[in-house]
């Protein structure tokens, strides 16, 4: 692929990123967190590209959020030194890699149970203690201790381990639950104060909660990833408009077997099968009333029922994914453009890093 080539001449399927929209997304989010006086820690699982994390840090972000040790290793190799991993660490091989990573960077991890804390405590020593945040379930129904009292109990356990330092609290909330999150945090912080435990970090999170973070005044930082590209789910959450979506998957209509069926060359290897509550697999920009009904590996079947104008064989269309983070992980490279002309091609460095 040549710099300056029109994205309309690229082989499909291909994931392209609009530089101007992405830059605006980065600056708008950072300006919001600067205005409310809160640290912002981008989650790199959305793009998995060190060059983009560099842009986020340059805009004012504080450190990065990774999901797995392998992701964090890629970014440590790229020079990033302030890394939070938001996943329970278990298994001797993984913990040894975590220990090696800790010797290179300023590392924080999470825990929500005794088994994880015991494993961390057996791995790390007081000469280089590891910062650990207690993960709290404030309503999302995923990981996390269930009550403020349980958070205090786990914080005490962490504090008693010579190789660990209790560093604070963390949650990944369900959208529009700021009142519940604040109540959980406030009560837990009060219990920690009564126990003379310092809570340095109170980490709120999620792109669907991005511009509501000020409604959680106890939080000291926010973590989010999807905002850099945005996607169909972010539009539904009210955090952006379709014009704010920087990623498109360009696909070609390769067949029209019937009047109301089109087939695209972008199947599950290019579009996520993660519906996120939608009835179909992405929004076709040129035909928003069409429905990407099913995916197989290499084919997307589009229902054209009810459309007056329908795409023809050979026509190229743009798709806004339901969930952009998964799409990034499907491609070896993302193609960036400005006004339709290719500006750069970035290797998705942490693609497939899932351990």
Image (cartoon, rainbow, N blue to C red):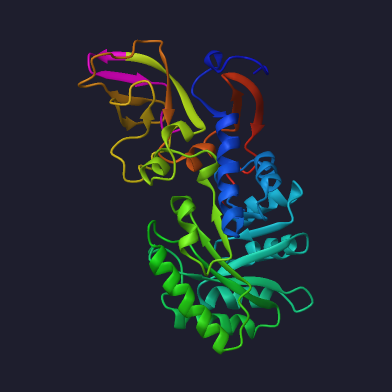
Q: Quick check: 129 left or right of 234?
A: right
Magenta stretch contains residue 354: no
Quadrant for the C terminus in the image: bottom right
Q: Quick check: 87 left or right of 306?
A: right
Give the vertical position of 149 relative to 69 (above or below): below
- Residue drawn at 60 percent across, 24 percent down: 337
Q: Nearer the viewer, residue 178 or 44?
A: 178
Give the vertical position of 288 relative to 112 (above or below): above
The location of residue 225, given as percent across then percent down, is 54, 48
Q: Can residue 44 be seen in this snapshot?
A: no
Quadrant for the N terminus in the image: top right
The location of residue 128, given as percent across then percent down, is 77, 73
Give the vertical position of 263 relative to 181 (above or below): above
- Residue drawn at 56 percent across, 28 percent down: 18
The residue range painted magenta reads 256-269
Q: Quick check: 112 left or right of 93?
A: left
Counting labels gives 0
The location of residue 348, given as percent across then percent down, is 62, 37
The location of residue 19, given as percent across then percent down, is 60, 30
Q: Quick check: 102 left or right of 292?
A: right
Question: As drawn, which residue projects farthest toward the front?
Answer: 35
Magenta stretch contains residue 257: yes
Q: Quadrant of residue 158?
A: bottom right
Q: Can residue 1 be seen in this snapshot?
A: yes
Q: Nearer the viewer, residue 340 or 10?
A: 340
- Residue drawn at 58 percent across, 84 percent down: 157
Give the vertical position of 52 relative to 211 (above or below): above
Q: Nearer the viewer, residue 50 or 218?
A: 218
């Amino acid at each position: 692929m040549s710099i300056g080539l029109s994205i309309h001449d690229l082989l499909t399927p291909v994931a392209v990123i609009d530089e101007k929209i992405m830059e605006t997304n980065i600056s708008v989010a950072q300006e919001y967190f600067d205005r409310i006086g809160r640290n912002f820690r981008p989650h790199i699982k959305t793009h998995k590209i060190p060059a983009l994390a560099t842009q986020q840090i340059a805009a004012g972000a504080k450190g990065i959020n990774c999901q797995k040790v392998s992701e964090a290793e890629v970014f440590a190799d790229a020079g990033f030194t302030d890394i939070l991993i938001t996943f329970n660490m278990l298994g001797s091989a993984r913990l040894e890699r975590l220990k090696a990573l800790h010797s290179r960077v300023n590392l924080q991890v999470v825990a929500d149970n005794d088994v994880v804390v015991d494993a961390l405590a057996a791995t790390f020593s007081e000469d280089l203690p590891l910062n650990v945040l207690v993960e709290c379930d404030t309503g999302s129904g995923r990981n996390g201790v269930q009550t403020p009292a349980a958070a205090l109990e786990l914080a005490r356990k962490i504090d008693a381990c010579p190789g660990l330092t209790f560093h604070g609290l963390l949650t990944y909330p369900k959208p529009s639950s700021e009142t519940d999150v604040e109540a959980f945090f406030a009560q837990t912080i009060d219990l920690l104060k009564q126990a003379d435990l310092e809570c340095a970090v109170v980490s709120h999170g999620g792109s669907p909660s991005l511009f509501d973070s000020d409604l959680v005044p106890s939080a000291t930082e926010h973590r989010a990833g999807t905002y850099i590209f945005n996607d169909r789910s972010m539009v539904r959450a009210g955090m952006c408009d379709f014009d704010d979506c920087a990623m498109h998957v360009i696909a070609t209509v390769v067949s029209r077997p019937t009047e109301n069926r089109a087939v695209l060359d972008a199947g599950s290897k290019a579009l996520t099968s993660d519906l996120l509550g939608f009835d179909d697999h992405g929004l076709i920009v040129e035909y928003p009333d069409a429905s990407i009904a099913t995916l197989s590996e290499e084919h997307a079947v589009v229902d054209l029922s009810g459309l007056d104008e329908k795409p023809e064989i050979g026509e190229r269309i743009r798709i806004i994914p339901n969930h952009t983070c998964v799409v990034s992980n499907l491609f070896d490279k993302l193609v960036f453009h400005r006004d339709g002309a290719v500006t750069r091609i970035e290797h998705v460095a942490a693609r497939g890093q899932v351990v």
